[in-house]
Image: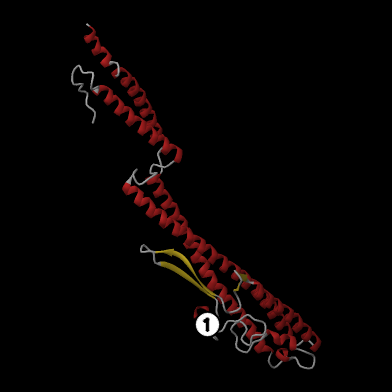
Amino acid sequence: MPSAITNGARIRTNTAAENAYNALDTANRSIALRQLRLSTGKRINSAADDVAGYITVRSLGERNSSLKAALNAVGDATNVTNIAQDGLDNITNLIMQIKEAVASAASGAMGTDEKVALAKAAYRFAQQIQTIVDATVFAGRQLLDGTFTASFVIGSRADNTLLTLGIDLSTSNPELNIPSNNFDLRLVSLNFAGVTGLSLASLNDVSASDLGIFDFSVIQTTLTSISIALTNVSKVASYLGGIANRLTSQEDALKSQITNYNAAISRIEDADVAKEQLELIRSQFLQQASIISLAQANQTPQTFLQLLRG
């Protein structure tokens, strides 16, 4: 620390001037530091500013980057579920219209021509189901053809091991809870929507000479099969609904965590502008005072030389 001792009347060593110079140098460094912090908005611009804080901020920043990546993955998973659910909703509406056509054909008041017309109309709805299945795509992959499965990283533990969420829309997924364990929405499938032996392509085979699945002897089975298919599609939609709810919860949690980490980083790393401004003004005053003191101290040897001039 500086000393006010001047060592008497000497002209070879000007301790007062050195003290004033050192104080000026300290004030200049303080001013430079405050200006740097105010210009960058950061209290910690290098490890030298705060060794412990620097390490903590880098660790928190790394964690925050992982959370942001997980948030993007949650967004992708949400997109998959939303697209698939929308496709299933459209298919549900189409199956309901097919069921309505089958129910109408089951009426004894319907003649052969009317039943054929209803079957052909229902087949058009079935074709639209195939169109929806083909068009329900994410990142170049079919979602409703019974093959889609994917895992999404939705977070990480303290030791950086990944937390993943699997979305499985394949025919082998037991969670879909379909008796035949074979969910397939393809038009020509013999197990349409998990119903063994049901193929919507059969609707196009109905004719005046062969009513096929619209024949009075089997139309009740056809109606039952369509009803089960409708229930199974709803089960898959419910499965996706549960995933969507979990994803919404995880998204909210990640956003909250990211905000909290940002706040923690800010408290450690960011500069308090008001405090730094006050310190800057203080250092500027000290700088001016040091310059004046240095100028005065440099005049002291001149005063002592007067003794030699006698």
Instruction: Give the labeled residue for mark 1.
Output: 172
Query: Which of the 4 quarters of the picture holds residue 197?
Result: bottom right
Residue drawn at x 34%, y 51% is 55
Viewport quadrant of the N terminus: top left
- Image height of 24 relative to 307, above or below: below
Instruction: Indicate left or right for 133 with 62 as reference.
Output: right
Q: Residue furthest left?
A: 8
SS at circle 1: loop
Of 53 and 96, nearer the camera is 53
**Residue 144 drawn at (x, y percent):** 60, 76
Residue drawn at x 70%, y 85% is 201
Note whether residue 134 is visible. yes
- Image height of 34 relative to 50, above or below: above
Of 242 and 33, nearer the camera is 33
Query: Which of the 4 quarters of the picture holds residue 109?
Result: bottom right
Of 238 and 300, nearer the camera is 300
Q: Residue furthest top?
A: 310
Q: Residues within 10 Å of mark 1 (few under 14, many from 20)?
A: few
Viewport quadrant of the C terminus: top left
Note whether residue 106 is visible. no
**Residue 296 drawn at (x, y percent):** 30, 17
What type is the residue that disc 1 sits on?
Ser
Snapshot colouring:
secondary structure
- Image height of 251 relative to 93, above or below: above
Residue drawn at x 34%, y 22% is 289
Residue drawn at x 59%, y 71% is 84
Q: Residue furthest front?
A: 309
Instruction: Indicate left or right for 271 with 207 as reference.
Output: left
**Residue 260 drawn at (x, y percent):** 42, 52
**Residue 12 drawn at (x, y percent):** 23, 21
